[in-house]
């Protein structure tokens, strides 16, 4: 499968390039970056420390989409929506790892998936996909005497909060409980906020250092606390999952998929 990486000079972009180069059945066929950045025209292999590959970083996503079977996108929400539109126009596979999408962005991506195959996940690691499935099950068993709180920590450069993974874990808990996350979520607390509401799903965000991504879902009741924790120590796990998702799309029908589909959970 010929794979292109948009945002190929970013933290995740570089990981993705290396992962594609090392994955049997995957072939690196292009990479783009934001128009105007100084990496445009440079050799992608040299950027990621693999030596010259003869593939230059392009500023044109639409041109790259023409030459590939699948594109992997870990960039910013407006760019991912534009890439989804191109994928729909050309019927290509698109894997989106970008987080911080608004409801409008998510709806636009969903529409584009009617004419392409798109896999989105706030977290492409296998462990988090399993954690989400477990959280949903636990939330279905424990009633709202158990207060649910999602705690996450990431490196100091992360620009969105709570993390997409924390929100995904919150959505899994809400689903298990049969409620809608937006109706019960408390995304921050500051000052005289009053006592906790029963049934609330709370979030706490920590930022600092080079933490790749720690997430804990707590179920706290009188007399006991039950915690489900995932800790990522390398970004490579996200790149591995994203490339696996791209290869999985081969032969699939148009539609919007998640890592749950890719892993058959
Ligand atoms: P980063 O800032 O290092 O990289 C983003 C790259 O995208 C930059 O190089 C930027 O120049 C490029 N970019 C922006 N607009 C572009 C455009 N229009 N065309 C081409 N390139 C463009 O950020 P990062 O740490 O790599 O994270 C990127 C995103 O991936 C964030 O939303 C982050 O939360 C998310 N992320 C998701 C997962 C997951 O498993 N789903 C894991 C890690 C990070």
Image: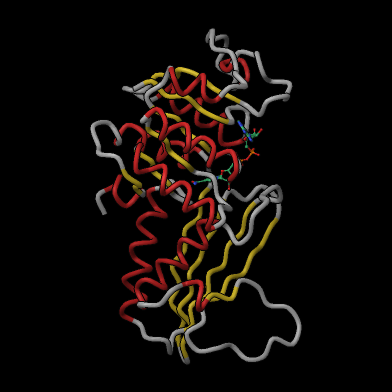
Write the residue at 56% across / 52% down. Answer: 101
Write the residue at 47% across / 53% down. Answer: 107
Image coordinates of residue 32 in percent, x first then y, are 58, 24
Image coordinates of residue 175 in percent, x first then y, are 37, 71
Image coordinates of residue 174 in percent, x first then y, are 41, 73
- Quarter of the image with the C terminus is bottom left
Depth check: 118 or 167 in front? 118
Q: Quadrant of ligand 1?
A: top right
Image coordinates of residue 176 in percent, x first then y, are 34, 73
Q: How is the image coloured?
A: secondary structure
Q: Tell me if 206 is positioned left or right of 31 in this view.
A: right
From what the image shows, is residue 258 above or below residue 178? above
From what the image shows, is residue 185 above or below residue 87? below
Write the residue at 68% across / 77% down. Answer: 189
Write the residue at 74% across / 87% down. Answer: 192
- Quarter of the image with the N terminus is top left
Quarter where residue 13 is shown: top right
Disc tally is 0
Residue placed furthest toward the right = 191
């Amino acid at each position: 499968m010929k794979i292109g990486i948009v945002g190929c000079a970013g933290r995740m972009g570089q990981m993705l390039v290396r992962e594609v180069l090392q994955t049997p059945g995957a072939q690196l066929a292009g990479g783009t970056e934001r128009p105007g950045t100084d990496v445009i025209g440079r050799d992608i292999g040299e950027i990621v420390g693999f030596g010259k590959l003869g593939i230059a970083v392009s500023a044109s996503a639409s041109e790259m989409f023409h030459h590939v079977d699948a594109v992997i996108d870990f960039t910013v929400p407006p760019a991912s929506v534009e890439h989804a539109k191109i994928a729909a126009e050309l019927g290509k596979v698109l894997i989106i790892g970008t987080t911080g999408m608004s409801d409008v962005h998510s709806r636009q991506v969903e529409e584009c998936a009617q004419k392409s195959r798109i896999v989105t996940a706030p977290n492409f690691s296998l462990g988090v996909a399993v954690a989400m499935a477990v959280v949903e099950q636990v939330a279905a068993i424990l009633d709202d005497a158990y207060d649910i709180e999602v705690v996450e920590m990431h490196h100091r450069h992360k620009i969105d909060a709570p993390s997409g993974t924390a929100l995904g874990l919150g959505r899994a808990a809400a689903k298990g409980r049969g409620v809608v996350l937006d109706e019960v979520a408390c995304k921050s607390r500051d000052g005289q906020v009053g006592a906790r509401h029963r049934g609330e799903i709370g979030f706490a965000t920590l930022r600092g250092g080079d933490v790749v991504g720690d997430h804990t879902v707590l179920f706290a009741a009188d007399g006991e606390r039950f915690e489900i924790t995932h800790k990522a120590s390398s970004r490579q796990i996200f790149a591995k999952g994203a490339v696996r998702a791209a290869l999985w799309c081969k032969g699939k029908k148009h539609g919007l998929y998640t890592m749950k589909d890719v892993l058959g959970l």
